Image (cartoon, coloured by chain):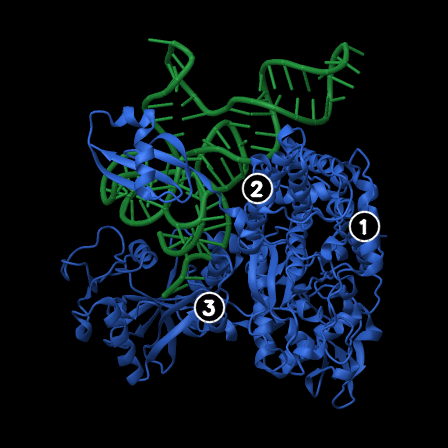
Amino acid sequence: MPAPERHLSERYEPAPIEARWQALWEAEEAFRAEPVSRDGVDGEPPDAPKEYVLEMLPYPSGEIHMGHVKNYTMGDVLAHFRRRRGARVFHPMGYDAFGLPAENAAIRTGTPPGEGTRANIARIREQLKRLGFAVDWATEISTCEPQYYRWTQWLFLRFLEAGLAERREAPVNWCPNDATVLANEQVVDGRCERCGTEVEQRQLTQWFFRITDYAQALLDDMDLLVDWPERVLTMQRNWIGRSEGARVEFEVEGEGERIPVFTTRPDTLFGATFFLLAPEHPLVGWLIDGRPEADDVRAYARAAAAAGAVERGAGDRPKTGVDTGRRVINPVNGEAIPVWVADYVLMDYGTGAVMAVPAHDQRDFEFAAAHGLPVRRVIAEPCGSADDPLDGEAYTGPGAAVNSSFLDGMEVDEAKAAVSAWLEERELGEATVDYRLRDWLISRQRYWGAPIPVIHCESCGTVPVPDEDLPVVLPEVDDYAPKGQSPLAAATDWVRVSCPSCGADAARETDTMDTFVDSSWYFLRYTAPNYSDGPFEREVLDYWMPVDQYIGGIEHAVLHLMYARFFVKVLNDIGLVGAREPFARLFTQGMIYRDGAKMSKSKGNVVAPDEIVDRYGADTLRLYVLFMGPAADDIEWSDRGVEGQRRFLDRVWRLVASQEPGAPAARPDREALEGNEAALALVRKAEQTVAGVTQDIDERFSFHTAIAALHELVNLATKGMSDEALDDEAGRGALRYASQIVVSLLFPFAPHIASELGGSLGMERLWERPWPEADEAFLTAEEITVVVQVNGKLRDRLQAPADLDDAGMAAMARELPKVAAAIEGKSVVREVVVPGRLVNLVVK
RNA sequence: GCCGGAGUGGCGGAACGGGGAGACGCGGGGGACUUAAAAUCCUCUGCCCUUCGGGGCGUCCGGGUUCGAGUCCCGGCUCCGGCACCA
C-alpha cells in the first residue's frame, strides 16, 4: 500500500489510518524476527547485534487493562528503536493461560476452562493488534495447549531425574477457599495471595522443587544482574533471607538424644539459661511421655495448632509457653537448663528448637521476664562491665564477651568464630548458614494446569511417565469444583493406567502444576515455538538468550522473577541452556492508579483501553501512558491528560499537512541557513531533539521526557508556520526538515500516525528506516547565553560568542548595569567562570 | 525492628557529572477569531512586596561542605515498598 505524495486530509482521524497500517503490518508480517541464520552458529558472525525485547506475558482474563498497555507500549518503543538502530530484534507474545480464574468461571458456567480461555485469548490478541504492537505473531504461544505443556512436563521429568523434584510429606499452606495448597510465595501476611482467605497449615504429601538448593546461587548471581532495580534485588534478598550462624547440639539430660538448634549468636552460648521447642517439634511427645507435665504441654500444643497463622504471627503477642520438666545440657559449660515449649518458636525455620539467651535477645528476654527464668549477661557494653544490669531490655549491640570462660574479652565476631571452632572440634556443632527460603511447592489440587507426569505403582512407587508418552493430556471431567483433591481424580479411566515399569495396575498423579512453572520457561520456548523434538532448539535458543530487556510489573519481584531465575540455573546446570540468568536487564513499571486506588473492577475505577482507542486512537493512548510520568513510578490516570496528547498529535498533523508533499529534504546546509536566524534555530532544535530523544530511549528509560522534547520541537515548528522570518527558501526547508524529524522520532511512540505522515513527507516504511543521528555541527551554537551571578545570586544574563575566553567573559559580566550596581563599592575577590554556563563574581 | 526507595508550583512531573529551579503536559486567568459556542491561535500562571524599574523568599526540617547545593555530607521528620516472634 505505497501511498507517496498523498495530500493529507485537513483533520486527523485515527481510526481508518490505524486500521490500514495494522492491516499492512499483519499482511507483511513486518515484525517477524528474521529467522536466525546459522551464521552465528557456523562460525560466521551475525551481521547485526541481537536484541530480545520481552514484556511479561498476559494472563488472559477478559480484557487487557491499562497496565498491559503501558507495559507493551514500553517494549514496543524499545523494539522499534533498536530495530531502526540496526539490531535484529525479537519481540514475541504469548499467554499465561492456565490458572484459577478460568477454572472458577468453568465451575460457575459448566463450560470447560479451555473454551473460555481461548475466547479470552482471541479477544486480547485483537486488543493488542488494535494498539499496533510490533510483535512477531508467528511465535505466539499459549501455556495451556498440549504442544506447550508437553514440554513443561518434559522439563518436570528432567528436574525429577536431577533430584530437584521430589514428593514428600511436609506442613503446607492450604487455602480453604480455593481448596488447594499454595507455595510460600503465594501466602501474603498469612493469607492466600489470590483470594485473601486465611491459609491453614496441613501435613500433606506434595511435590516440591528444591529451590533451596539454589538459595546461594540465586544470591551470588545477583552480581550478573547489574541492570535490575535495586528494590527487586532487595525483595529477593529479603525473601531468600540468608543468615550466618551456627548449629549447636544440646543433649537431653539423662538420654543420649541430642537436639540441634540454629543460632546467629553462638557468641552468647554461655548466656543460654533455658531452651525452647516449637509446639510442633517432633521430639516434644517423646520428651513428655509419661511425665506429670504431659497434659499441660499437650493442651498448649493443641491451642497453638488451633491458632491461625495470622494470629500466631503477630509480633506483639505475649510470650506464652509451658515447662516440659525436662532439661538439656549446654555443651560449652555442661549446665543443665530447662526445656520449655513456646509458640513463638517456629517449626519451619532453623531446627524448630532455640537456645534462649534472654540477656541478648529481646524475645527471650520477654519470655524470661514472663516466666521467672534467669538472665545472664555475657556481652559487656563498650566501656561497661560484666555485672552491669540490663536496662529493661535485651542488649543486642556490640561488645566483648564476659562470663564466658574461654571467650572472655573477645569481640562479638571473634567470639562467634572461636565458639564455632570449639564446637566443631568436639562434634557438638559447626558454623552454618540458614535461609528463610522454603522449597517451592508446585502441586495444586486443581484442574486447569499441566498434569504432573508421574504414575503411582504399588510395587514400583513413583514412576515417571516415559518421555515418549508425553504429553499427559488433561482429561475431560464433568465437574471442575475442587473437593480437597484434584478434580482429575474423578476421571477414573484416565487415572487408571498400567505401570510403565512393571505393567501392574497403577494410578496417575492427579495434581497439576503451579502455573508459575509454566511461566518459568516460556521465554525459552518463544525462540522455537513449534519445535517438536524438544522444549527448545538449542542453537536458536542460545542465539537469542538471555532476554536483553525484560519489562513487567513489580508484583512479580519474588514470584515469577525468582522462579524463572531458578529454572534457568537448573537448565544450565543440567546442560540444556547456555544462559545462567534469564533476564539481563529488568525494568519494573509502576502501576496506574485512578482516584487514589489501583484500577479494579470491584472499585469501579477502571478505564478500558478500548474506550480510549475508540475515542482518541491507539497512538494517543500509547503516547499518554508513556507521557504520564516516569515509567517506573505509580501514576494517577487523568482523562484530561489523554486529551493533551491527542491535541499534540492534532498539532503534528497540521504541521505536516502544511508542508508540500514530496521527497525527504536533506538536512539543510549550515551555510544555506546563514542570515536566517529563525531557520537556523529551528534546525538546531531539531538536532537537539534527535540527540535528546535518542538518549532518553537508549540509556534512561525516560519516555516521558522524550515525548516532552517532541512537544517542544513541534511547538517551535508550529510557531514557525506563521513566522514571516521562515517564509523564504531556507525557512521553508528548515520547517520541512523539522517536520520530518518530528515524524521520524515520533514513530516508535505513535507508529500509525507517523507512518501516515511519513508517507506524505517522502519517508515510506518508517519501521525500516534508520534512526536519525544528530549532526554535531548544529548542537553547538556560536553565541551562548551566560548566567551572571554575584555571590552566587543570579543578577543578569549576557549573550557572548561561544569561543570567548574566561577573562573576556568576566569583563563582559562586570559591565552589565545590574551587575555593576551589585558590585558597586565592593571589591571582587574572585571570578568563577564555568565555560558556556555562568560567571560568578565573589565580592566583599 | 531490619532492608530498599522517595519527598520540588493547584496537579503529573523536569533539571542527566555541584552551575539559570519549575522544561513538557494538565488545570486556571486574560485576549484574538466567531452572531454565538466548540475547535484553533496568542498571552500570563511558584509565593510575597513593588513607586512596575525591580526587590525578597522558595526544592520536607535543622546543620555542614562549596564561589555556588533540589543535587554532596551529618542529624532528624514524613510517606511508599519488602521482610519480620526468622532465633
Tag 2 subunit: A
x then y, percent, for residue B38: 73, 22
CA distance separating discs 2 and 3: 41 Å
Is the C terminus of chain A in the top left, top right, bottom left or bottom right quadrant? top left
A161 w.r.t. A136: above or below: below
The chain displayed blue equals: A
* Residue nearest the observer in this picture, A806 or A448: A806
Q: For mark 2, does the 10 Å Cα neighbourhood hold few (<14), some (14 to 19), or many (20 or more) residues?
A: many
Q: In this view, does A2 lie to the left or right of A255?
A: right
Q: What residue type is labelled 2?
A: Lys
Query: Is A34 rendered above or below residue A462?
Result: above
Label 3 lies in what chain?
A
Q: Distance between the residues labelled 1 and 3?
A: 43 Å
Q: Chain B is drawn in which colour?
A: green
**Is residue A529 placed above or below A560 in the rendered structure?**
below
Q: Which amino acid does label 1 sit on?
A: Trp
Residues packed near mark 3 inside 10 Å, few (<14), some (14 to 19) or many (20 plus): few
Find residue A344 and name its label.
none
* Residue A664 in sight from this viewpoint: yes
Residue bearing mark 1: A21
Q: Helix, strand, or loop for circle 1?
A: helix
Percent from the top left, x then y, of residue A494?
A: 82, 74
C-alpha span from label 1 to label 2: 30 Å
Residue type at numbered disc 3: Asp
Q: Residue A685 carries which label?
A: 2
Residue A227 at what x, y percent from top left? 51, 61
What is the quadrant of residue A293 in the picture? Answer: bottom left
Secondary structure found at label 3: helix
Classify residue A651 by image quadrant.
top right
| First along the sequence among labels 1 and 2 | 1
Q: Residues within 10 Å of mark 1 (few under 14, many from 20)?
A: some
Residue position for label 3 = A223
